[in-house]
Amino acid sequence: MFEFKLLARQGKARAGVFKTPHGDFQTPVFAPVGTQATVKTLTPEHLKELGASLLLSNTYHLYLRPGDELIAELGGLHKFMQWPNPMLTDSGGYQVFSLSDTRKIDDDGVTFKSHVDGSTHRFTPERSIQIQNNLGADIIMAFDECSDPNDRNYSAIAMERTHRWAERSFEAHKRPDQALFGIIQGGVDPDLRVKSAEFISSLAFPGIAIGGLSVGETKADMHSTLDLVTTLLPENKPRYLMGVGTPEDLINGIARGIDIFDCVLPTRLARHNAAFSSEGRLNLMNAVYARDPRPIDETCDCYTCRTFTRAYIRHLILAKETLAGTLLSIHNLHTMINLVKNIMASILDGSFESRVSGWLKQWHGNAERENFTVSTRYKK
Amino acid sequence: MFEFKLLARQGKARAGVFKTPHGDFQTPVFAPVGTQATVKTLTPEHLKELGASLLLSNTYHLYLRPGDELIAELGGLHKFMQWPNPMLTDSGGYQVFSLSDTRKIDDDGVTFKSHVDGSTHRFTPERSIQIQNNLGADIIMAFDECSDPNDRNYSAIAMERTHRWAERSFEAHKRPDQALFGIIQGGVDPDLRVKSAEFISSLAFPGIAIGGLSVGETKADMHSTLDLVTTLLPENKPRYLMGVGTPEDLINGIARGIDIFDCVLPTRLARHNAAFSSEGRLNLMNAVYARDPRPIDETCDCYTCRTFTRAYIRHLILAKETLAGTLLSIHNLHTMINLVKNIMASILDGSFESRVSGWLKQWHGNAERENFTVSTRYKK
């Protein structure tokens, strides 16, 4: 029911295809995030036009509202949100740690309060898998604990717990039409990461995720961790770098052997009036665009850039019209999906290694992580 | 450049076609409102899919932000908002009277404060036309004064001023590629309405609007005013009932000889989580829809009803996702556009008079004007 096939390699970079019950998707792939069973401000038709193939949705949010049982009763997540193509849900672990004000972790699981209404809930590996079984995404994730990468002691404890929880998640998983991926933790400590990569690879997961990155470590630490971990992973399983990132992060991740990415950044930037561009990141609210008849990015062929001027988008922003967010989300997602598509083509035709430095240079100006940290609410 | 052709009549109801520099539109027509150069939550592609033919935008709002000169510099309103089909702008008069907290009317014009930043501005008939010439819509409106319909003395004064301003608007209008319509006022007083209808009809306007209705008068008064006025209007000019209304109002207006309608109601209701339906108006936030697998309206074939459940739309509302507004706007606008399209077909095939009472009955439950008065901020 699931099959990962490698089509080509260039250095560590890989091009492949992953078969799921809701169709195949090619890798490398960038998955837009639909936290609450919708990619903010877009219809499923917009996402199809963008060429999105894999969507991510968040277990924590859907469990709290509208509830996984309600979604199951209505035919599952694909039907509920009318996305007929591949989907992935996370385990809820990351959100429990980052969004909940009060949470208590023990070796069995986590008790936390809802950010919606303050009510108390408990997630265990078994519960997370049960909820994800109810939601019905094609790819689901083991329940894990994401540590502060700069705290070695805590990272060691969280990693050990993540390993026990990986085994329990594997045991609890019931649906053969869903592929359960394991998650590697270990912060930025090489010994921990080696241990975690080896342990998670030893289990029979059909795919392997790298968690605990892009949560406060330096870029250099992220890259050295990826360099190390990817050498230890089996070649025949897809590798998923969770919650990453900017266009530059994608290029760097692919060059290090990553196949799957997801990030809220394109739609979150859109809500902050910001756009990726080959000139660097633009904030369309800037007065300099008031009479600018150009598209956001003259090299872009997305619907927004084919159709609207910077001046019009700035007007929509100032007038507080939600269409601004829609148009910027379309552009930012197109940028990511199109970049990954071009990179895949270059891996297939053997030009990736000669083009990678050019891409990194082109997209460097969009990687201002200090302004828009992906995970600003991380709490130990 | 402009031509109105009547195709068929059934009683007082008319079917026709109006030719403009941006294409023809059939009448009766319902024009969605894009107050700030965008129909809230929708892209121009959505509007094309809905079969919208004529869009309205608001001179008052666009003058204040982003400014009519900026729009002219960027090629005019059609190009600015990327609506290639017919457009109409109002004169700004109604908004000056209803939105501005401080305004002073004299026979020459109106001085008012911006609802955006409190700055002081002045509209005269000449200034309104100059702004509308800058915006460049196909149909533009004479500057008028809308009175409290229940205040006869004020209605008489406002009507006389409207007549002088109609003459001045006509004189000031410079662009032959824009059709300037005159506006009839006179509250709900039959003598005033007769006088105004005769005066406005005596000028060489290519179309005639009826203003000052749906602003606080009873339904009975609206209907008797329409009955009276439409008998006095030339047959060969299109008739535009401004700012009206509900599905029921449209049916009643068409039966009385109206050709053109506009109203914010479909998109405003959408922002209040409400939907037109053949069962009567629904509020999708209602808990009764939490697990409802049906579309909003089982008899509707819009994108929203073909695709999504009530349960999903309710989830989006509770999760504060803007997609809820998009999906409800699509449904509500489709309802209006489709109703008018069906009515036009019935006028053409001669079945209107036998079907009108059925339509009125079907849509009656959507006409709760007491809950959603179109113009709640009317001030004398």
Image: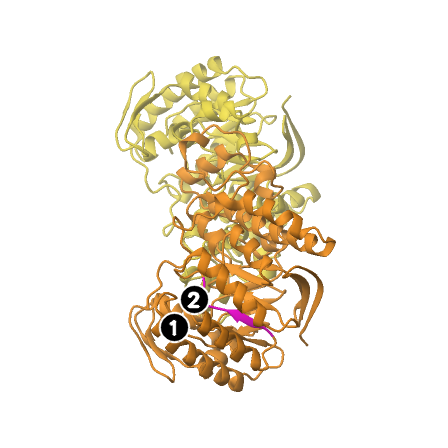
Chain colours: A yellow, B orange
**Residue placed under numbered mark 2 in the picture:** B188
Q: Nearer the viewer, residue B54 or A366?
A: B54
Mark 2 belongs to which subunit? Answer: B
Residue contact at pointers 2 and 1, CB within 8 angstroms: yes
Q: Which mark is residue A246?
A: none
| Mark 2–mark 1 distance (CA, rounded to whole Å) | 9 Å
Q: Which residues are magenta?
A: B207-213
Discs 2 and 1 share one subunit: yes
Give how far across and how far down residue A153 sits, in percent: 29, 27
**Residue placed under numbered mark 1 in the picture:** B155
Q: Residues within 10 Å of mark 2 (few under 14, many from 20)?
A: many
* Magenta span contains residue A356: no
Quarter of the image where the C terminus of chain B is located: bottom left
Rendering quarter of residue A321: bottom left
Give how far across and how far down residue B141 sits, in percent: 52, 74
B30 to A73, vertically: above or below? below
Q: Nearer the viewer, residue B64 or A253?
A: B64
Q: Residue at x 61, y 60 (%)?
A: B29
Rendering quarter of residue A20: top right
Asked if residue A214 lies left or right of residue B43, the reply is left
Residue placed furthest toward the bottom = B171
Three-letter code for the amino acid on which mark 1 is drawn: Ser
Q: Residue at x 37, y 32 (%)?
A: A95
